[in-house]
Image (cartoon, rainbow, N blue to C red):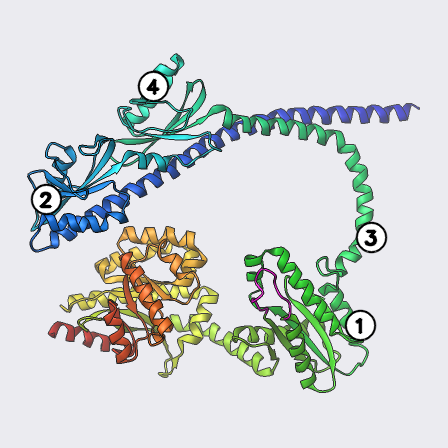
Amino acid sequence: MIRKNKKSVFKISYIIVLLVISIVTLVWYSKILKDELSNLVRNTLKEVSSQNVLVVQKEIENDVQSLEEIADRIGNVKEINEEEVVNTLKQIIYRYPFKVMGYCGTDGIAHTTDERTVDISEREYFRTALGGEACISKPLEDLVGGGEIIAFSAPVMKEDMVIGVVFATYDVTSLREILSVTSFEGEGYTYIVQSDGSKVVDSVNPTSFQNMTNIYTSMKESDRRNSKAIERLKHYLDTGETGYVIFYNKVGKYMYSTPLGINDWYLIDVVPVDFLESTSNDIIRRTYIVCAVLTAVCGVIAVWLYWEERRKKKQMQTLLYVDDLTGGNTFAKFKEDVEQRLNINYGRTAFITMDLDEFKLVNELFGYEEGNRVLRHVWKVLTEHCGDGEYAGRGVADRFSLLLYFEKRPDIEKRVIKITEEIQRFAIPSASEYILHPVFGIYYVESNGEDVESMMSCASLAHNQAKQERDCIYKIYTNIMKDRILEKKQLSDQIEHAYKNHEFVVYYQPKYEAETRRLAGAEALVRWKRPDGQMVSPGLFIPLAEESGFVCKLDKYVFNEVCLAQKRWIDMGLRAVPISVNLSRRHLDTPEFIGEYKSMLDQSGVPIKYMQLEITESAMFEKKAEFLEIIESLHKMGFVILMDDFGTGYSSLMMLKSIPIDVMKLDKTFVDDFDDERGEQIIRCVMRMAQDLCISITAEGVETEEQYKFLKGIGCDTIQGYYFARPMPEEEFEKCMEKLDSD
């Protein structure tokens, strides 16, 4: 009895200690959670404010840039006629969100697109533009139509002198509409104010300050508790810092201030305190509830775990051998059955692997449930084609394996074709025209003594070969495949040695101006020249270098070699032209290459305008976020960025509006379709879009006079291809540059 009592006391003591530890842990965790949630609130406010700043900046800066471009065009006209200028502005104003546009000479008498004449000589934005700078005004009263506006102005220059001003007015309500996008489930709203608190744009939110003229005044009038918040906000607006205050307008609210980077304007984001902190309090309250429930059920869980463990042991066999999606055999079960069956001589045997080409698109386009239906259909077809002693099993995702018997090898190939036809009968309801493409790898087993792994390896080699060939249903394993893989491995092993042995050389393929046929630049291409003079095809070693990551080292080598060549040509007094160097997609994984490239460029002393970088379209699409960050850094350095192989991907047109490239290189496949009516229209459309986005065009793979004339006629900037020149060694390209000097 005493022993039992001691056990009871020990258990009770253990429970008490566990409970105390749980309570202390809960209190400690609650404090940490509350602090973390407070940080999350501030970070959320900062993030929303930053996004709003970007929206306003982009809207205004785009409009200012457009106005400057219009001013430049006007300045380039030989004789400026105010009436003609205004007529031109009338024709283009619909492209912009401006209320009205106009032009005036240095006297300040403006003629507007709504056919009015006004004197803006006393307006500050006119005087600023007259001084040679573009300007964005403070809110003003519209001299013509009334209402509150913001004016944009830009000087019209001719021979470094200001001869006039082009301007546009922007209705303040337009900015208010931009800021009216709801945030925090409609509880948040935004102001724009000047550094002295004066209103630039107020909010239409019913809980905001109504008829606000100065934010400090409105805060003071709304609640006397706001004095400290006003003082803190003044500090932020005076110093240009970002930060938040809590003020009161019927209820407590967060106010986050961020410099807008335009004039002395600040973006003020507001959201009720209760809205944000209610979420935090709900999280903490739920945490307490969860902890209490967890403590209560600990005993139940312990018992349940014991029985669950026993149940899992019983289920393990089923889980290992039964595929939960198809209800058929897993690969583990398939492997075990095959190993047992091969010990019995059933005749000649074929081991087959298969999957669906681009199956991931089914999941992405039609959803995972539709993808699962496809896999169940495939399994049904495969099992229906399995006879006595034949097996099928499903591996990872859409990979299946088969063991079939035959009298003659063509029998297996006929069965594969039949299986393909039945799989392709499956119709996806939302896209009945979508056709499934199964791909098979066939290995004819040489002896029943082979293990499953070796058979799987051989079938996979054949399967991979079939995947590489477009529209191929199946491939049969041969020893030649293994030999090719060994040859590929040997070549891969030789690449590093070739690099150390300076076997890689740079070739240059010139680019010519379409209009003048003059040398405009070149693309640097790497070539592998063995010591015996034999050239290794780039189609062999470039993919190997991509796979291994060696291509990054190769790209840097080419970049450095081109820098040294450019420096040598400049020192010789030759007229330098820009040379573009390819940048592999593997560089997107190692952005530190930017510093290395800058170091090589600085050491060579070559101006950056003579060095350009080419990145393929596919690399831009696969890692768009990383690419944008890298491109921004390269642009800041001064590099011109070219998009190579445009037209080989399916996202090209969408990418043009979001990828900040300078030059677009039309792929040869585009150029080859110029004589097809639809192909021609596509080329023209892409050309117009690029020109509207101020992107230069280089056409690749131009081989005929007809292609050249067509591309020249539609405004292509530069031409690259065999029509003008093939890739050539450095000394031959140097002669091209010497000829350029003599022209």
**Residue 326: x %, y % from top left:** 72, 61
Mark 2 / mark 4, whichever is N-terminal:
2
Sequence order check, earlier mark of 1 and 2: 2
Residue 730 visible at all: no
For disc 4, the marked residue is: 218
Residue corresponding to mark 3: 314
Find disc 1 in the rendering and name its residue: 340
Q: Residues within 10 Å of mark 1 (few under 14, many from 20)?
A: few
Residue 530 showing in the rendered view: yes
From the viewer's perspective, is 318 left or right of 54?
right
The image shows residue 561, relative to residue 122, as above or below, that is below
Q: Residues within 10 Å of mark 3 (few under 14, many from 20)?
A: few
Residue on which disc 2 sits: 164
Asked whether disc 1 touches disc 2, contact meaning CB atoms under 8 Å apart, the reply is no
Q: Looking at the image, is mark 1 or mark 2 nearer the viewer?
A: 2
The numbered mark, 1 or 4, whose residue comes first in the sequence reads: 4
> For the point 76% across and 56% down, which residue is it?
319
**Cα distance between the residues tagged 4 and 3:** 72 Å
Instruction: Based on the picture, tell me whether residue 470 belongs to the magenta stretch.
Output: no
Residue 16: image location, x then y, percent: 75, 23
Q: Main secondary structure of the magenta part?
A: loop
The boundaries of the magenta stretch are 425-436
Q: Amino acid at mark 4?
A: Ser
Residue 720 at what x, y percent from top left?
28, 73
Which of the pair 518/371 is nearer the observer? Answer: 371
Q: Amino acid at mark 1?
A: Gln
